[in-house]
Image: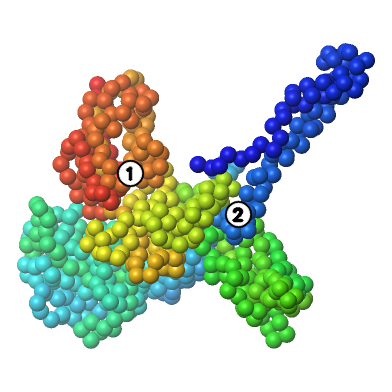
Amino acid sequence: MSLPAPNLDDRSFQDLVDEAKRLIQLKCPEWTDNNVADPGVTLIESFAFMVDQLIYRLNRVPDLNYIKFLDLLGEQLRPPAAAIAPVKFSLAVPKPANVLIPAGTLVSTTRRGQDPPISFSTQTDLDLVSVSVQAILTQAVGQEAVSQGESLAEHSEFACFSEVPQVGDALYVGLTQAAPNCIIRLAVDCHIEGIGVDPMRPPLIAEGWDGQQWRQIKTLLDTTGGLNQRGTIEVYIEQHALSSFSGISAGWLRVRVIETIDDQPRYTSSPQIKSLTLATIGGITTVAQCTPITNEIVGTVAGTPGEILQLNRFPLVSGQETLRIEISTPDGWTSWNRVESFAECGPTDMAFTVDDIKGQLRFGPMIRNADGSPRYYGATPMSGSTVRVPKYLVGGGTSGNVERGAISVMRTNIASVAKVESIEAAAGGVDPESIESLKDRAALTVRSRNRAVTALDFEQLVRAASPGIVRTKCVDASELGKPGTILVLVVPQVPPGQFAFEVLQPPIEMLNDLKEFLDLRRLIGTTVRIEPPKYLGVSAMVRLAVKDKSAAARVTADANTAIMNFLHPVSGGYSGSGWPFGRALVVGDIYGILQNVPGVAYTDLIRLVAVDPVTGDRGEPGDRIQPESLQLLFNMDNQIEVIE
């Protein structure tokens, strides 16, 4: 609770008018007409109005002082954060040479009405490498790999696995190059004799060698039905590296037979391969809702300590701690590094600070010592030097949290690219911090003195370090069997309504940056782990009646939205701050939500089903879902039936 602020002058407009009329009686008793129609009273009210405005401004002084005190403490408004989304670039046709999609490539949403499109840019280079088949090997479990190069050359069939495939049998395909972040299409001519597997659920897994281990790769499309017929297989390889296998150097992929689950049928005979070709058809990379500004000439400096220069574009996107500038000298350009403050800088350190919100660059000041001698905190550029910024990013905000598929327009022309599409919803966009939010945060900063000691300190510092993190929970991991370890669970900003489960997983780069940030502020002897919480999926099976049968579709959609919003990990729950960690969900909660949905006559039946959000495995329907103490609920795949 904030302390009561003094009201420096509590007189109102009417108080001023009344006081002036009392003075008239003392100073000018012959003036007896004090009605509102009197011209003199009109003048009194006019002056009272102006004085009332002055009093209002006077009472703003405590707020001004509060802000100035925060400025003395070094507090700054947090800049906006950019929304991030994975996007797929598709080639028009496979190319015989590599296609480079450079960092800074611009894509955007389509224009909607009068609103301008929202621009995004790639953060790293995406190299769509041209590949072909280097080698094909087959390996039965427990045996040596056998090359099938001769069979391919003679266009004769060969068996992928053992005569009766066993768990562990594998088909190895060597690519001429490693293809990280690429989508590879394999055209396979094959058939299987005898009773095969379920084409929709073949007991196979696709893997790629990342330089250290075999890592599962994502199968985007399989029209072969588990190598049962001629078709294509499209896979996305996130991490890949050249390696030597069976004496052959290549970028290796493999398809391996795995154990069946429940009633999943097994292979009874091996698929026969007639031919196999492959090509790169696209790739996936991450884009952020920001625009890169390159090689901007900011201006020239006068050569005085503490000088401030203004960037052309602002505010800057958060996370640019490694931003650097270049300053001209007679010997060429010198590189200057960004620092958080000048407290540790000496007179020769080429450093500067940035106000991300205002877009201002500031050089180190000069402070007079007690004896009058100057002390320089950071170097001062020579007079007349030109300042250039090689690259900085502007943009960000909640407007970038767009739905899946919204990013679909190429803004940077790359001739070979035919299509771009966001494959997940963009998330993590945060608007610039408000003054009121800064006041609340500064009080906590003063309390913790920027040191992580208590659980609340860790939670507040994590949110201060990354605007994209909106929920935190810090626990002592000693009770989890890891004494001396502090576990910080983080939930990123996610869009309202329905979104993919993957959006709840913060990027590994963000987690590493947060850990490095806390390592500088934690107590010696403690170990900090930062990770997302474990999620427990919940599917609601609902049977309800509607007041108007013609509006059944709308009411069903509204009911589904109401359930999703109620169980939302960021904005759900009864308080609107996210479903609590470890809190049980009962059918009574859902009944209460549905009775407030317009058009619902009554709710006949509700059953809750626990769902593994990763594998999709479902539990038995029941009246209650009880997560573990550190688990969060995640709504998925509700089933709503309308009864007559």
Q: Where's residue 81, x and y in %? A: 51, 56
First-in-chain label (1 vs 2): 2
Q: Is residue 20 found left or right of 323 in the rendered image?
A: right
Instruction: Give the quarter of the figure containing the C terminus.
Output: top left
- For marks 1 and 2, give the CA distance: 33 Å
Quarter of the rendering containing residue 157: bottom left
Question: Could you tell me if the residues under marks 1 and 2 are in contact, i.e. CB atoms within 8 Å?
Answer: no
Determine the residue located farthest toward the right in the rendered image.
Answer: 30
Q: Amino acid at mark 1?
A: Pro
Residue at the spot 76% in from the left edge and 37% down from the top edge: 54
Determine the residue located farthest toward the front in the rendered image.
Answer: 26
Does residue 152 appear anywhere in the picture?
no
Give the residue at mark 1: 580
Q: Nearer the viewer, residue 138 or 51?
A: 51
Q: Is residue 618 above or below residue 422?
A: above
Q: Amino acid at mark 2?
A: Leu
Give the residue at mark 2: 70
Q: Where's residue 543, x and y in %? A: 24, 29
Residue at the spot 62% in from the left edge and 61% down from the top edge: 355
Q: Where's residue 359, x and y in %? A: 64, 60
Residue at the spot 53% in from the left edge and 67% down from the top edge: 321
- Mark 2: few/some/many CA within 10 Å (<14, 14-19, 20+): some
Q: Where's residue 267, x and y in %? A: 10, 62
Residue at the spot 43% in from the left edge and 71% down from the top edge: 127
Q: Nearer the viewer, residue 359 or 141?
A: 359
Quarter of the rendering containing residue 129: bottom left
Q: Secondary structure at mark 2?
A: helix
Front: mark 1 or 2? 2
Q: Is residue 299 above or below residue 477?
A: below
Q: Is residue 512 found left or right of 540 in the rendered image?
A: right
